[in-house]
Image (cartoon, grey):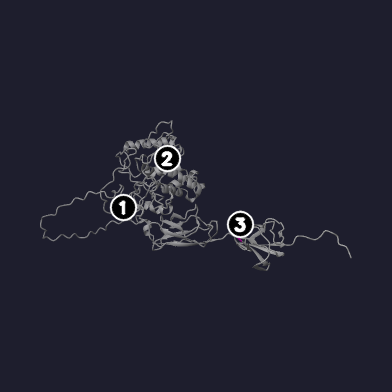
Amino acid sequence: MAAHFGRRLRKGAATTAVAAAAVAALSASQAPGVAIGGQDGRTSSGTATEPEESTGDPGATGNSPYYTDLPPLNSPNPSPSASSEPVVQGAAEAGIPATVLDAYKKAEAALRSSKPGCHLPWQLLAAIGKVESGQARGGRVDADGTTTSPIIGPQLDGNGFALIKDTDDGRYDGNSAYDNAVGPMQFIPSTWAWAGRDGNDDGLDDPNNIYDAALAAGHYLCRFGWDLSDRADLRRAILSYNNSTEYLNTVLSWLEYYRKGTHEIPDGTGTLPGNRSDTRSTSPGPSTPGTGPSAPDTRPPKPGKQGGGSTEPPASPGTPSTPPATTPPSTTPPSTTPPTTTPPSTTPPPTTRPTPTDTVDHLENAGTGRLTATAGEAFTERIRARAETDAGKAVAKVRIRFTVLGDTDTAFTGGESVATVLTDGSGVAVAPALRAGEKTGDVTVRATVVGRVVPGLEYRATVTERVADTVVRTDDEALACTPGGEFAHRVEVLATRDGEAAGKVAATATLITAADDAAVNDEGPYFKDADDKAVRTLSGLRTDADGRLKLPRLYADDTTGTFLLRITTAGGATLTVELTVAEADTASSEPTTDA
């Protein structure tokens, strides 16, 4: 989370006691079945003492700090009406700024259409937005949904937080040394690079825009085919956002609270939470509802800190900073005594222990064989990559990003083109199942190490067209016509594969010269094109989902006789149909007499 909301608000002993009481009450009355305040997981982003403890899957936020305030014990105020009393806004009231609330609801509607099986409730986005940024700092956004100033968390340099070295060259967070979580939904740049979405249709995906960030958060929570109406999947999705049990319980508390009701308030009038997961001191710091962040810190940055790394907002452009004090030059003449030379210390300087990512030298194919699948079907084999040192030793706890490249509709399970996976104890990361799209041909999947520049590893996957092994007519109606007329019946066929209907299989229909001569016949029956011209070959045909194909109407020229129509499907299945063109029966019914 880590949005800059002025000075950090600290919890005192009294605050701690109140929070404990709230947890107990919430466990009993407000969130049944939720173990509020459980301590079996990581309870604070500030608890990591070694960078290696934070090199697991960083989730959407890099496990950044977040607000720990719990909702009030009473039910939220209902939506105000003309006859209702004015809504009372407390320190944790249920009102959500209008633009922020609109962004959550639009993201829910978009996911309902694109991923209906996810069942994403907008209240979950509201709960995460509350915990991550206090609803975009109380709704301080412009008309397009962009925050009035960037929301940037502390730099993830391993000093009390996860260690994530720069992945975006400072594009989003202004920090070219380490990553920072960015925006109202607090995405780290490496996650935003694949999860980012354009939620307000302005042609951009901006993590500081609430419409973009809310839609990106929805897609992030709906990946891997998770169904958020299922309790287990809901918990998995929230923990994937920030891997902390305390975070999970806090989000679930707000989710239950918002589900009971909420109301819209004007932008910029929301309240700011008062407690953060990385603030553990005993000095209380109550917040003033609706006042927004305190004045920016105009002090120059400390040496060694990169842009975006401070936990206070940077000075606004054009704000003069206080110049450093200067010492007048000494009037004492320089000493003629030569300087004392200090012998070098025999104690080696302390060194920073490298993270697993720092030790990766290259990636190896971990046994992935030939990848082939029929269009629309899943690849039976999954892509596996192994991270190794220069000595060939496996490296665990390294994030590997798998990206489907090029113009293709082949994607990982859930429809995503990018997936990030943590290497296991043997240094191997296994990508999610890959599903072939309708576009046939070769597909490239690239594996790269997140947070380190080493050559990527590419895998080739081939998508083959759908095929049929049998094609038959669906009826036995005679196909006959008089010269210059129109055939009364249309030809309809059924394509199958291994006895099952072969849907979406390509097919071709041709009027051929003879059974042993597949050349196109230049006379006899024909189809018509869009300009009513005669054509005797139809390509680009495709069976429907049930394997059926009904051909266009057939017409006859003045030539009589028996003709052949051949239908061929992808996979080599063929069917030859006879067509008859003959004059109408004009024989007289009167008896003949001898001379």
**Along the line of sight, the residue nearer the viewer: 418 or 245:** 418
Q: Dot 2, crowdedness within 10 Å: few (<14), some or many (≥20)?
A: many
Mark 1 or mark 3: name the one nearer the start of the chain: 1
Residue 295 drawn at (x, y percent): 28, 44
Mark 3 residue type: Thr
Contact between labelled residues 3 and 2, with CB atoms less than 8 Å apart: no
**Relative to 41, 529 lies left or right:** right
**Along the line of sight, the residue nearer the viewer: 475 or 55:** 475
- Residue 307 badge: 1
Residue drawn at x 29%, y 45% is: 296
Tell me how far mark 2 sits from mark 1, CA to CA: 33 Å
- Can residue 498 be seen in this snapshot? no
Mark 2 or mark 3: name the one nearer the start of the chain: 2
The dominant secondary structure in magenta is loop
Furthest residue in direction front, as rendered: 595
Which stretch appears magenta? 503-507
Mark 3 element type: loop
Contact between labelled residues 3 and 1, with CB atoms less than 8 Å apart: no
According to the image, label 3 marks what residue?
543
**Along the line of sight, the residue nearer the viewer: 556 or 439:** 556
